Image (spheres, helix red, strand yellow):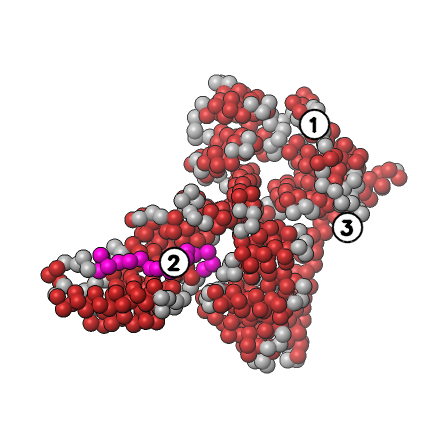
Amino acid sequence: MSGTMRVPACIFVMASLLLGQDPSKLTPEARSFIEVHFLAAKRAEADSDFAEAIDEYREILKKYPKLVPAVYQNLGLVYYLARKYEAAIETFREGIQLDPSMVGARLFLGTAYLDTEQPDKALPHLEYAQKQKPTTESATALGLAYSALRQYDKAAQYFKFGLDSSEQKDKQLYFIGDSYLKSSERVANILAEKNPDSKYDHLLAAKILESQDRYQMAAREYLEAGKKDPFNAAIFSPLARMLAVLGLDKPSELALARYRQLMVVDQRATLDASKLPKGQTADVGPKIDYEGDLKALPPVDARNLPPLPMLNSDVNAELRKRLSSDRTAKWKAGTDNLLHARWPEGIAALEGIPPADWLRDYLIATAYLWRDEYHKAEETLGRQALKSQTSPSVQMLVWEVNQQLSFLHFNRLLDEFPQSARAHFLKGRTLDAQGNKDAEAEYQAAIAADPAQSEARIALADFYLSNSKYREALAECQKALEVNNYFSPAKIRIGRIYIQLRDPQKGMPYVQSVLKTDPDDAQARADLARGFELLGEVDKAIAEYQRALALDPSLNRIHYVLGRIYRKQGKAELADNEFRVFAQNEASERAKHLTSGKQLQENQADKSGRASH
C-alpha cells in the first residue's frame, strides 16, 4: 500500500538482543556461530547486498531455528527491503510464534500486509505495536490500515498522533486531510441516497459544486434548496454570490434582500464585486427564471422569523419546542447570543443545559464551526447525545465539519510544503476535478518530486485515459507496479487498457489478480467478462456480466451488452428483456437529472397559463 513507512538503509542493529540470550541456552559454539553469521549479514546489509544478508541469516536459522527469535525479525526486515513481501510475512510470522512480544516484527509484519493489500490482517499487529511502543511509524501504519478498511475517522486520529514528531509532515498533513475528505464524501453519499431531491440533497450538491468553481450548477442547486427551505438564510447569501458571479444582478439582489429579511441582525450585508470570481456567464444549459422563482417564494414575516435563521427549518422547529418550554432561560440566552454572533457567551449558556439533549450539542458544534474552531466542533460531535443522532441535519453538520478539517490540513500542506510531492498531487486533483488541463503538469511535478508516489501515477493515468491516451496511461500504471507489484489500482487499469485495446490475453491476468484480492469488485468482473467475450468464450462472459450486475446493479450498460450477446445467439426473448431493462434504467436516470429542469419549465408554463386567464 502506498504511503507505508520506508525503512532506513541500515536495518535495526540487534546484536545486543541476539547475544543477550539466556547463557544456559547459548553454548560457546552457538554463540560463535551466530556472531560470525550475524556480523556477516550486517556487513551485507550495509552494502545493500540483500541476497547475501538473507543467506547469512538463513544459515543461523537452519542450525538454530528456535534459539534466537530475533533473527527472524532481522531476516524479515531484509526481505521487506528487497520487496519480497510474501517471504517477509512468512518469516515475521515464524518469529512471532516463538516470541509474540517482538514489537518490530509485529510492526513490519503489519506493514508488509499493508503493502500486499491485506489491511484486515495488518490491523491486529499494528494495534499491538502502537499499544506497546507508540511511534510516528506505528501510528501512520495504523492510520493507513484503518483508511484501507474505510474507517476514516479512526485513520485521521492516528495520522494526527504522528504529525508533530514526523519527519515527513507533508505526507502526514495529506493523510489527515484525505481521511477527513473521504469521511465527508461517505457522509454526503449516504445523505444524498437517503434524502433524494430534498433540501439537504440540493444544499449539499450546491456547496460541493461551489467548491469546484462550477458556479452555474451551484446556483441552480442553491435555488432548489431555497425552494424547499425558503426560510434558511444560509442558502440565500451564497445564492446571491453565485448569481452575481454569473452576471445575474437582479436575481442576485433579490437573493441578498431575502437574506437580509431573514437575518435582521445583518441588515448591512453586501457583496464585494471585486472579490468575486470572474469569467462565468449564465448562457449555458437550461434557462432558469431565477428572478421569477425568487419572487414566488413565500414572503418573510418579520414577526415570525426562525430563532436562528442561519439554520434549516427542521432544526428551528426543534429549537422552537425547546424555547417554548424553557424555564431556565438558558435556551433563550444561548439562542440570542448565537444570533448576534456572540459565540463564547452562546456556547457557555448552552453548556449550562443538561447534556442529554442532542440539540444543545448540535448548536454548540455549530457555533464552533461558525467561529472556525473546527477541532472543537469535531470534539463536540463526538458527544454521546449527538453521536447517536442520525437525522439529516446532524449528518449535514458532520459533513461540513469534516470538509473544513480536510481544507484546514490541505491548506497547511500547500502553505508549508508547496513544492512537495503531496502538494503537487493535491493541486493536480483539484484542477482535475475542475476539468482544468493544467492537472497534468501538477501530476508530473508530483512524480518528479517523489517517483515512488503511486497515487500520482494512477491519477495521471486516469487523466490520460480521459483523453484517450492509452499508451501513456499504460506506461504510468506499469511504473506504479514497479514500485509495488501488488498495487491493485495499477493492475486493474493495465488489465482494462489491454482489454479495451482488444488484447485480452495480456489484460485478463491483471484483472484476475485483482479479483483474487477482492472477488466483489463489480467493475473488475465486468472487465473480465469483456475479456472472455473478446476470446469468444461467451458462456463465461455472460456469467461474469451477470455476477457484476448482482454486485452492482448500477452498471446498467451491462444489460445492453447482454442484450447484444443474446441477440447474436438468437435468444430474442432474453435479448428483448435486457434491452427493455436497460432502456427503463436509462429513462429513470435521465428523469433524476432532468427533474429540476422539468419542474422549472412546468412552473413557468403554469405561471404563463395563469397570466393568460
Between 22 and 590, the one nearer to me in the picture: 22
**Residue 14 on the magenta span:** yes
Quadrant showing the C terminus: top right
Q: Amino acid at mark 3?
A: Gly
Q: Residues within 10 Å of mark 2 (few under 14, many from 20)?
A: some
**Distance between mark 3 and mark 2 Cα atoms:** 54 Å
Between 206 and 306, the one nearer to me in the picture: 206
Q: Secondary structure at mark 3?
A: loop
Instruction: Say whether disc 1 or disc 3 marks the residue closer to the N-terminus.
Output: 1
Q: Residues within 10 Å of mark 1 (few under 14, many from 20)?
A: some
- The picture places residue 484, in percent across and down from the top left corner, at 46, 65
Q: Give the left or right position of residue 383, taking residue 91 as reference.
A: right
Q: Secondary structure at mark 2?
A: loop
**Residue 135 on the magenta span:** no
> Which contiguous range is marked in magenta?
1-18
Q: Amino acid at mark 2?
A: Val
At x 59% / y 45%, what residue is drawn? 195
At x 57% / y 66%, what residue is drawn? 476
- The picture places residue 73, in percent across and down from the top left corner, at 29, 61
Quadrant showing the N terminus: bottom left
Name the dominant secondary structure of the magenta segment: loop
Q: Is residue 332 above or below residue 118?
A: above
Instruction: Say whether disc 3 or disc 2 marks the residue closer to the N-terminus.
Output: 2
**Distance between mark 1 and mark 3 Cα atoms:** 30 Å
Instruction: Say whether disc 1 or disc 2 marks the residue closer to the N-terminus.
Output: 2
Residue that numbered label 1 is attached to:
269
Q: Is residue 496 above or below residue 351?
A: below
Residue 145 seen in the current view:
no
Residue that numbered label 3 is attached to:
285
